[in-house]
Amino acid sequence: MEKEGKIIKSIGGLYTVTDKSFRQFVLKPLGIFRHRNIQPKVGDNVVFNEESIIEIKERKNDLYRPMIANVDQVLLINAATKPDFSFLLLDKFLTLIEANDIKPIIIITKIDLLNNIEIESLKSKINYYEKFYRVIYFSAKTMFGVNEILEVTKDKVNVLAGQTGAGKSSLLNAIDPNLNIETNEISKALGRGKHTTRHVELIKFGDGFIADTPGFSKLEFIEYQADQIKFYYPDFFSLSNNCKFYQCTHIHEPGCAVIEAYQKGLILKERYENYKFIYNEIKIQKPIYRRDEK
Ligand SMILES: Nc1nc2c(ncn2[C@@H]2O[C@H](COP(=O)(O)OP(=O)(O)O)[C@@H](O)[C@H]2O)c(=O)[nH]1
Ligand SMILES: [Mg+2]
Ligand SMILES: [Zn+2]
């Protein structure tokens, strides 16, 4: 009997594979993978029989942190307040997620803490992002937006991102109270060592999956070149055909269509300023090479 499934957990050479009806099997990979130097990983879509994983399907992507293959989208959690909403953090996360070629879903949580005027004022800016990204407003307290989150995550492999305190764990608990994840884990977030040795696991999340640990937590751009990040701004990219110079960085060049759009107010002020800020941050960073982490 051969079946198809997905690896949701790996511990000491044993892989937990779930089939379409969420039945789970603990399996070993065929020896042939080791000989070919292929290591199955969480998120892999596989063919298996009673004893073994016998085929690993081609990966559509391969995330480094957490170590997961075939991520469909990142739920980027931003608190509307507490901590203050930060467009810089939003744009930094979006840049990193785009750089990994994964689809971001922007979730603005804790909206129960804003009054109507504050919500409208935030929305008037965040509207800008809705041209390129799905934006969902949510509250773990009132459950506003819960159906929208269930709909968008259905049948998908999701990864959470967002700063500590943004409301990631609360969102998971709101969607599935059985998860019972600790919230407000400030002390844990500071204790580094633990995190790197943890085994990542995909957990059932509505009718999809979610990684049990957030990704993109270190907002580092070590691997990127300043003049590459323009490709991770879909709003700039769509204008760049009209820039005078083919390799325009949209920072200072004459005849730049992006700068022109910004000056006309067609690009959100914060968005363009953050782009310049991130560009310069990368430009001045010393080349550091990423330590080999496991
Ligand atoms: N009022 C309100 N508080 C929230 C909401 N979501 C999270 N919080 C609170 O914000 C704090 C941090 O939330 P947590 O889920 O631990 O954030 P995480 O660090 O991103 O996992 C906790 O005290 C939560 O109770 C929300 O939608 N509304
Ligand atoms: Mg948390
Ligand atoms: Zn330009």
Image (cartoon, helix red, strand yellow):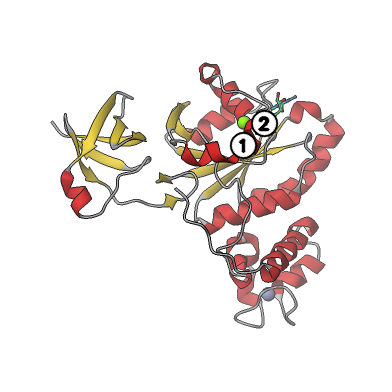
Q: In this picture, is 268 found above or below 55?
A: below
Side (left or right) of 265 relative to 291: right
Question: Residue 94: x percent and y percent?
Answer: 62, 52
Give the image quarter of residue 225.
Answer: bottom right
Q: The residue tagged with tag 2: helix, strand or loop?
A: helix
Q: Is mark 1 within 8 Å of ligand 2?
A: no
Q: Which image quarter is the N terminus in? A: top left
- Residue 191: numbered disc: 1
Residue 183 position, x and y percent, is 64, 25
Q: Residue at x 25, y 46 (%)?
A: 56
What amino acid type should be assigned to the residue bearing mark 1?
Answer: Gly
- Where is 228 relative to 269, above or below? below
Amino acid type, callout 2: Ser
Q: Is residue 142 left or right of residue 208?
A: right
Q: Which residue is mark 2?
A: 187
Q: What is the x, y in percent for residue 256?
A: 71, 77
Q: Is residue 167 visible?
A: no
Badge 2 residue CB within 8 Å of ligand 1 = no
Question: Count the marks: how many?
Answer: 2
